[in-house]
Image: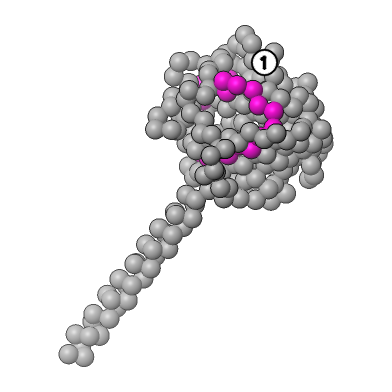
Amino acid sequence: MKKWFALCLPAFALGLFVASACNSTLADEAAAAKSPIDTSGPEWKELGEKDFTTVNGDPDTWVWKDGVAHCKGTPVGVTRSQKQYKNFELVCEWRHLRSAGNSGVFVWCPESVLKDLPPGRLPGAGIEVQVLDHGYKTNYEKGGRKADWFTTHGDVFAVGASKMKPFPPLSPNGSRSFPKKEMSKPSPEWNHYYIRAVDGEIRLSVNGEEVSGGENCEPRVGYLCLESEGAPVEFKNIRIRELP
């Protein structure tokens, strides 16, 4: 009897360990799936396929299925919101489907830079919230270049003729708001963005913590754009709340 018990005890202990590990994994997944921002109120609106229109891509550059926007990454370009926004809060989840992916969310993009925009081009104005995978930095530095002018954790910066006074820490040339904390997860994990854009001030929270932003933005009204920039990327749970 003692011998049988001694033989079974390790197997029993292993079973407890596996069960505990599985429960821990399930708990982690449940925590990751819960948005750090409560968007359950009636003032929040879900944005889906009907709320966007392709500006300069192929018919299959952006494909929506079951509430998820699938972007193949080519040609370079954007899909924009059907309406313009001024003051709002925006949440979305995104993930790159391969390492070194590049994308972004444009805020306050004026109509003038989107009209007749040819394929292969990005808008020449607006405020960009960077959506960049960590592998991009690794690949950039393989050629001996120093990746000190960008990060992969949520840079915010003015594009082209647009203006913004970035919050510190800043990029070396002072044009970008660098994240004060590294919160982004690598491909193919999902990341959560919360963007608050009010009266020319923009703030970005990554996976539950505010990291970057800027003020004195011009323009401070315009379209939202999702960016196609060479690699497959997905967006889901896009929701917006307009503010006074």
Residue 166 appears at what percent x and percent y? 79, 37
Q: Which residue is mark 1?
A: 111
Residue 171 visible in the current orientation: no
Residue farthest left in this picture: 1
Find out whether residue 78 is within the magenta segment. yes
- Callout 1 amino acid: Glu
Residue 148 appears at what percent x and percent y? 74, 40
Quarter of the rendering occupied by the C terminus? top right
**Which residue is drawn at the image coordinates 82% and 33% (left, top)?**
216
Residue 163 appears at what percent x and percent y? 80, 27
Residue 124 visible in the current orientation: yes
Q: Which residues are magenta?
A: 72-95
Horizontal relation, residue 98 to residue 222: left or right: left
Find out whether residue 122 is within the magenta segment. no
Query: Measured along the vertical axis of the image, is residue 210 above or below residue 8?
Result: above
Q: Secondary structure at mark 1?
A: helix
Quarter of image, res 162: top right
Residue farthest top in this picture: 116
